[in-house]
Image: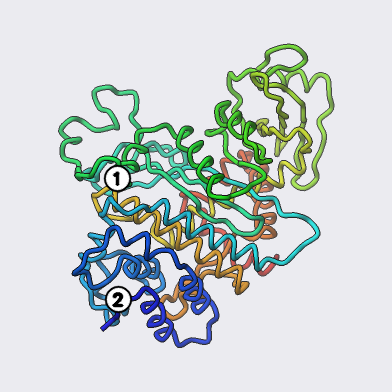
Amino acid sequence: MLQYKSTTIISELQKYFSSSEKAIPTLLRELSSLRFFDRIFQAVEKENTQYSGYQRFILLLLFPLFDIKDISDFTQSPLYQLYKCGKDVFYRFQNDFRIPWRNIAFKMNRQLIKRVEKHSYNTDSKPVRCLIADDTDLPKRGRHFELLSRIYSHVTHSFNYGFKGLVLGYHDGKSFFGLDFSLHGEKGKDKEKPYGLTKKQSKKRFEARRSEKSFGEQRVEEYFRTKTGMLIEMIRRAISEGIRFDYLLTDSWFTNFELIRFIATRKIKCCFLGMVKNGNTKYLFNGKELTFSEILKILKHTRKAKTLKKPNCKYYEVDVELKGLKIKLFFCRMSKKGDWHGLLTTDIKLNFKQAYEIYSTRWTIEVFFKECKQYLRLGKCESRNFDAQIAATTICLLQYNLLAAVRRFEAYESFGALFRQTRSETLEITVKERIWLIITEIMAELAEYMDFEPDILMKHVCAENEKLTNLINFKNIAQVA
């Protein structure tokens, strides 16, 4: 019988993996080095519980290694032969609103990032550390999920029922780590059908009871907040947790003055870098308040566009002011017939080549979404309880981060090596900088040939479109690189 000790479960699993592979022992060694979970889970323990909260947490983290898709498959897995506990043990654990999932994630991520940085090779050039923010669609089947809403997908241009997941990640120059997230709904403009549901449909949604000021209730309150407000809170929390970064990277949906001003006023040395829409926002240029298109029109008549060979694009760069804040605008076009796009940064000293190279790192969060959905079942939790959705999403983020750390330690070219004994399908790694350089150049060439916008084409390839992702053999690209 398994003893009530946190380290026992890992030692038992180490015996189970009698393999010559290095990844799994490294993964279990990393898990055994985490020493704080006992204290966190003590508040939700019961005296008659056979398995501690930490042990259930560890087993949930290891589900992908045993090809366990969800909790309902646990009794049919090899893990069940070792630890004969019922499925309800995990269901109750995920539904518990008292568990501080965000605190757990930050404590684990701090240790993983610190260990990875400690083992990194010293180079002459200091790596650029970035916080990356983006949202993703988490569609659901059925309408009885708690806080379910009708959401619009900007990738497929269609409506689905589910959640919008806002994620803040950290890139240290080599690896991406998911730091924080929040789940949101979209209220919509129809007052008779808020969140895309009629009153009858809203009443049929599941509704859990929670204690006031509990961790679960706090996550419910976040659901109704704006994404910009939540993102600012996430960044503030990351800074307080000791995360240091050089740039915050966002796409045009999150580029707004509120977020830019927040980053510019931080005491730590950090800057904002994001795409900017061709909208009605006015910038002070040559003593006049002008929009993006108006400034571009003046530049076309007064200056000759510069050329960047890799990738092949034309660009302008100009210093302007946004509501008294000094910023730099970049205008770039990837093809002769393509539209002009804009980059905005608070780093006045940054040139276009540097800005382009740094901003290309933002695509690692698209890879994160793709791999988490395809291999770690991000958004596939079938529990109607919102607390379980938070728990499942947190566990998915931590699974990815743990695998990212193992990959760095053992220099694996794919996640598939971790699952070789339990899964026949391999998971290829696509985050390496040299591979991404090849991919972005290929996408730029394809976009010019198809008379398509590179940014939109890349979004389709890396985010939701499974047909396009299957067209790219990442393993062959890695070998070529």
| Residue 248 percent coordinates (x, y) | 61, 41
**Gap in angstroms between the C-alphas marked 1 and 2:** 27 Å
Number of residues whose C-alpha sits closer than 10 Å to that of mark 1, classed few (under 14), some (14–19) or many (20 or more): some
Q: In the rendered view of the protein, which quadrant contains the N terminus?
A: bottom left
Q: Which mark is residue 94?
A: none
Label 1 amino acid? Ser
Instruction: Answer with left or right where residue 463 lies relative to residue 480.
Output: left
Q: Residue at x 70, y 39 (%)?
A: 334
The outermost residue toward the top is: 288
| Amino acid type for the residue under numbered disc 2 | Tyr
The residue that disc 2 covers is 4
Q: Position of residue 215 (x, y in %)?
A: 33, 46
Q: Report whether 312 appears left or right of 440.
A: right
Q: Secondary structure at mark 2?
A: loop
Q: Quadrant of the C terminus?
A: bottom right
Residue 404 appears anywhere in the view: yes
Judging depth in this view, the residue of 44 and 335 nearest the camera is: 44
- Residue 390, relative to residue 321: is it above or below? below
Q: Are marks 1 and 2 in contact (CB under 8 Å)?
A: no
Q: Of the numbered discs in the image, which one, if any, rests on residue 214?
A: 1
Residue 415, given in percent of the width and then of the height, sits at 52, 69
Is residue 322 positioned above or below 379 on the image? above
Label 1 secondary element? loop
In the image shown, does 200 or 264 lie closer to the viewer? 264
Identify the residue shown where x is 39% and y is 33%.
Answer: 225
Please tell me which residue lies in front, 99 or 232. Answer: 99
Q: Is residue 189 above or below residue 471?
A: above
N-terminal-most mark, 1 or 2 = 2
State the image quarter where residue 50 is shown.
bottom left
Q: Is residue 136 left or right of residue 124?
A: left
Q: Where residue 159 sits: x, y (%)?
A: 35, 37
Can you see residue 461?
A: no
